[in-house]
Image (cartoon, grey):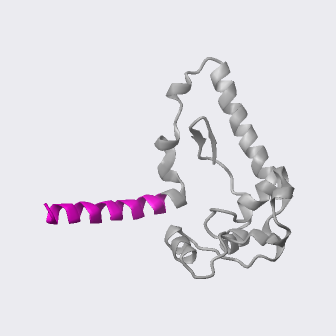
């Protein structure tokens, strides 16, 4: 997904293979995907030891939360050792194409205020769905506490 001025395109392709998706887990901070994009754009920003990084993959937001609470969690998720600049260029090119589509729509006279915004499309991303479920459960727990403690 790409965000441009609050707009989003949910039809982004995941260029990872099925095996890489399994090994990398839910795409979040510093996974194969994010590390690949930085390798493509600013490789000097990626520490060389990413190549030997031990995987910390979780299939969903709950597993990532558990991983993040581990005593020795190094601060990243997934398997950044799988990252490549080539993958990052594919992802970035996809973002550019999508951004060009938005700009073209606006320049052709389409009202950008009528285009889907991030909040309208929020529910399609698996990480966002998982987070929304967790947030809803916490909200209900909070509301229940308030009802029982007037």
Q: Nearer the viewer, residue 123 or 43?
A: 43
Magenta segment main secondary structure: helix
Image height of 32 relative to 1, above or below = below
The boundaries of the magenta stretch are 129-150
Q: Is residue 21 left or right of residue 142?
A: right
Instruction: Please tell me whether residue 116 belongs to the stretch shown in magenta.
Output: no
Q: Position of residue 83 (x, y in %)?
A: 79, 65
| Residue 47 in view here | yes
Q: Quadrant of residue 100?
A: top right
Q: Residue at x 63, y 70 (%)?
A: 25
Q: Is residue 44 left or right of residue 128?
A: right
Image height of 66 relative to 44, above or below = below
Total numbered labels placed on residues in the image: 0
Q: Position of residue 149 (x, y in %)?
A: 15, 64
Image height of 143 relative to 12, above or below = below
Q: Nearer the viewer, residue 43 or 20?
A: 43
In which quadrant is the C terminus drawn?
bottom left
| Residue 16 in view here | no
Q: Nearer the viewer, residue 133 or 17?
A: 133
Q: Is residue 101 left or right of residue 44?
A: left
Q: Quadrant of residue 99?
A: top right
Q: Residue at x 59, y 73 (%)?
A: 58
Image height of 126 relative to 113, above or below = below
Q: Residue at x 68, y 52 (%)?
A: 13
Q: Position of residue 29 (x, y in %)?
A: 65, 62
Work out which residue is located at the far left of the displayed protein and give it: 150
Work out which residue is located at the far bottom of the displayed protein and give it: 71
Q: Residue at x 56, y 26 (%)?
A: 112
Q: Quadrant of residue 19?
A: bottom right
């Amino acid at each position: 997904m790409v965000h441009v001025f609050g707009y989003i395109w949910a039809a982004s392709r995941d260029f990872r293979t099925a095996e890489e998706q399994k090994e990398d887990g839910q795409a979040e901070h510093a996974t194969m995907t994010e590390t690949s994009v930085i390798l493509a754009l600013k490789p000097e920003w990626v520490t060389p030891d990413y190549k030997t990084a031990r995987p910390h993959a979780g299939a969903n937001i709950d597993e990532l939360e558990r991983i993040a609470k581990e005593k020795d969690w190094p601060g990243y998720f997934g398997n950044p050792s799988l990252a490549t600049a080539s993958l990052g260029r594919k992802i970035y090119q996809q973002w550019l194409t999508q951004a060009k589509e938005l700009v073209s729509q606006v320049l052709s006279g389409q009202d950008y205020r009528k285009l889907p915004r991030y909040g309208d499309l929020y529910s399609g991303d698996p990480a966002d769905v998982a987070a929304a479920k967790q947030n809803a459960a916490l909200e209900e727990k909070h509301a229940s506490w308030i009802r029982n403690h007037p």
